[in-house]
Amino acid sequence: MSAVPSFSALADDPCVLRARAQPVRGGVVHLAQTTGAAPGTAIASGGYGACNLGDHVGDVPEGVAVRREGLRARLGVSAIGWLEQVHGTAVQEVREPLPPTVATADAQWTRTPSVALAIMTADCLPILAWSLEDRWVAAIHGGWRGLVGGVITATLRSLAEAGSNVHSPWQAWLGPAISAPCYEVDAPVHDAVQQRLQRHLPRASMKAVLLPGRAPDRWQLDLVALARAELGVLGCAAVWGGTECTASQPHYYSYRQANRVGPQPCGRQASLVWRAPEG
């Protein structure tokens, strides 16, 4: 099995909040989480900051490209797969060489070592998954629309159709996202989530996913609980993370926090997963 790296090159990186290695059969899966700014530095109230990786939020494109390439070099991967995320359920397989244009999708997977998969967020839930025995890793954008549409299920279906063993043990890590107390939704969103639960996740606790809001026509939506319910139905062996709130931690980008009093620029952080080459 490959040696677990120390990530010493990232220890002093103000844009990489954490990096960890997960031993798997035949190698190591790596996870990394970027942030808007160094912990203790406010960014959630609005702005691009020094760490923005989103190229669709109005920031200078050349600066974003430099940050993305710098991140790739610091992570030591051959490439990073980026997506044009649209809150849908389309799934993209990533192979080298990467195509010249970015795919429009909200999930991606690969069996190619040293290719990192990135999901950008500023309140939505990043979901990183990996097989303990097969060679696949996957990255999923978990906004409410995608979760209600079945984007996690679509990802596993895409893997299975391509011949991956989705019945072997696999795990998932949930990155920082807006928490239920900070995320109130209206009746149409409530009804869409409720229908998803009733039709596809009947054993899930409605009260754990949709909590009463501060007004009679508002509900607090727990994206983490919704994702955990589907991951459990799909046979995920273990789920990590999901404990940090982007809207209450000032070093994360948070679209809702930034736009609380009016339109404000808001960058995007990234959650990444990749498999190290065997060696």
Image (cartoon, rainbow, N blue to C red):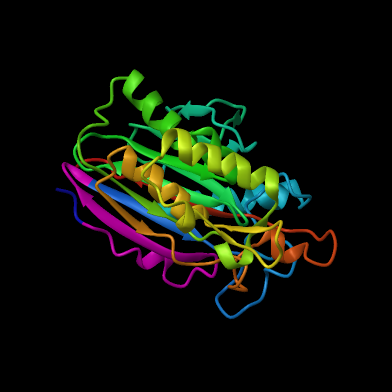
Identify the residue at the far right of this view: 262
Q: Residue at x 52, y 52 (%)?
A: 125
Quadrant of the rendered image containing residue 94: top left
Image position, residue 168 (x, y; %): 20, 35
| Of the pair 223 and 28, the residue shown nearer to us | 223
Lateral position of residue 254 relative to residue 160, left or right: right
* Quadrant (top left/top right/bottom left/bottom right) for the C terminus: top left
Lateral position of residue 54 relative to residue 97, left or right: right
| Of the pair 196 and 123, the residue shown nearer to us | 196
Quadrant of the rendered image containing residue 42: bottom right
The verdict on residue 116 being magenta is no
Lateral position of residue 88 relative to residue 33, left or right: right
Image position, residue 211 (x, y; %): 55, 60
Q: Residue at x 24, y 47 (%)?
A: 237
Image position, residue 108 (x, y; %): 46, 34
Residue 79 visible within the image: no
Residue 20 in the image: above or below residue 96: below
| Of the pair 32 and 202, the residue shown nearer to us | 202
Lateral position of residue 215 relative to residue 136, left or right: right
